[in-house]
Image (cartoon, rainbow, N blue to C red):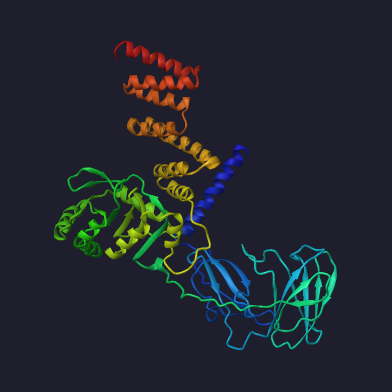
Amino acid sequence: MSPKQQADSKRYGSAWSAIIQLVRDGHSWSGHERNRLLLNRGGAEFADVSSISGLDHGGDGRAMAMVDWDQDGDLDVWYRDRTAPRLRLMLNQHAPGEGSRDFVALRLEGTTSNRDALGAIVEVVVDDTSKRLVKSVRAGDLFLSQSSRRLHFGLGDAGKIQEIKVVWPGGKVEKYRGAEVGGTYLLKEGTGTAVEVTRTPRTVRLTDPPSEAYQSKNARIILPAKIPLPPIGYRNALGKPQLIVGKGSPRLVMLWSASCEHCARDLEMLAKSADQLRAAGIDVVGLSVDGGDGISEAYNLVDSTKWPFEWGMIEPDAVDRIDEFQRALFDLTVPMAIPLTLLCDREGKVSVLYRGSLRVEEVLSDLKATEGANEDQLHALAPPFAGRWFTKPIDPAIALELMARQFEARLEEDSLFYLEAAMWRSGGGPKGVLGKELVQKYYAFARRYKAEVKPERAAAHFERALAIAPSARIYHDYGTMLASHGELIQAKALLKKALILEPNLKPTLGALALVNKLIAEGK
């Protein structure tokens, strides 16, 4: 691929990323148009039957397939939304007695043609020979969809099927007799006889449509895969720096503000439930987002609620990182609101997220359900409504990489935390690809901080890059940076490692000679 093609590819990918982010932020490609169903009135006219059909709702529909799912003689609809629930079944429910005898269903089987008879054209002649219905067997007929290959003919008030004519994919024309209104038949190439197929009615129990939970201010969300927070700090009540989560015991992390009534109620509720939470082994930390003039009010609220757990102040940049974390978890991003509470396991991974107010009973129940749960179990717990998944549990490595890609646009340095975690969880080729990308990114950050004369931050990135893939170039740059700050012994060790990998690297030979001279001179 040429440099121009690579650049075009990057621009194309960036454009798609921007479009997808707009959709994730709540913008719709359809302009928030509701789903519509149009009924052909028998000519060039259509009637809008969206409302009376039950298909008129705000889901962002993407794909649809038609099939007689319950085997009652009419076509039902499976369709996929971009928004949850991703997969819906809409049953076509005639009034009792209707729809049982106004159709014929045909399944074709090729012998000299392809077995599925793809490309075959079927003509059904009913009553007088002037009324003809034509359909074809297709592979894929709607966007990202494949309807049933059983051809379903609605016959209305037709009383009799006169003839069925099939033009097979090879061009052979064959007529079939023996089919009656209201039956399901197999048409096998070369037989000329319609063989009736027994249709067994299927009972389908539908649940009530789920509420659009994302519109609610309160939400309890069990994650389908546990995701760690990046290292985020705060200052406790004594001003000492601390990490929000770490390995040890489960931790409930609540972000609150003294100006928030819901926060005050939740703090008081958690304080009164301290014995229950401690008995369950849950450590609690309350983090005030108040700054400036709000600090004194935060102290007053802690005192008035008799807060028995650890608490502290969190800076705006740390709040932004938590906001990015919760935004990255979902296809539909929702701006962060206070209170926001995270339930973390013993390893510091977030398993449940609570937007708005929470209940202690829920927290205790969620901890019991998620603690020690594997991917399959978390996958089963995640849906907020009754139903079944039609996808497999998410691979933790893929989940971590997705988090990294979401962080890249706004908080690229934090994205490296997730990208490295994804690399160590991956295997084979993907691990190598991610490792190469990581080394390049760590090295770029190290060089940037070196240029900005921030040696500690640069050193951290040099170390991460070398831990993944030792490189003479990186050892050289790291060593020369340390030498420039007087760390001659460490610099010498790094430069020697560079020469082990590339013995004739002239810049490194020169740098090492200079370092040795300075050491000998006692400088």
Task: Pick the quarter of the image with the N terminus.
Answer: top right
Residue 502: x and y in percent read 50, 20
Q: Residue at x 53, y 63 (%)?
A: 390
| Front-lying residue, 221 or 407 | 221
Q: Is residue 412 left or right of residue 277?
A: right
Q: Residue at x 57, y 87 (%)?
A: 95
Quarter of image, res 485: top left
Q: Is residue 86 left or right of residue 197?
A: left
> Relative to 163, does residue 469 appear above or below in the rendering?
above
- Count of numbered circles in the view: 0
| Front-lying residue, 374 or 82 | 374
Residue 461: x and y in percent read 39, 34
Q: Residue at x 55, y 44 (%)?
A: 10
Residue 430: x and y in percent read 53, 42
Quarter of image, res 270: bottom left
> Relative to 504, does residue 229 appear above or below in the rendering?
below
Q: Residue at x 21, y 43 (%)?
A: 240
> Relative to 263, does residue 185 appear above or below in the rendering?
below
> Relative to 413, does residue 152 appear above or below in the rendering?
below
Q: Is residue 359 visible?
A: no
Q: Is residue 282 left or right of residue 99?
A: left
Task: Pick the quarter of the image with the C terminus.
Answer: top left
Residue 256: x and y in percent read 25, 57
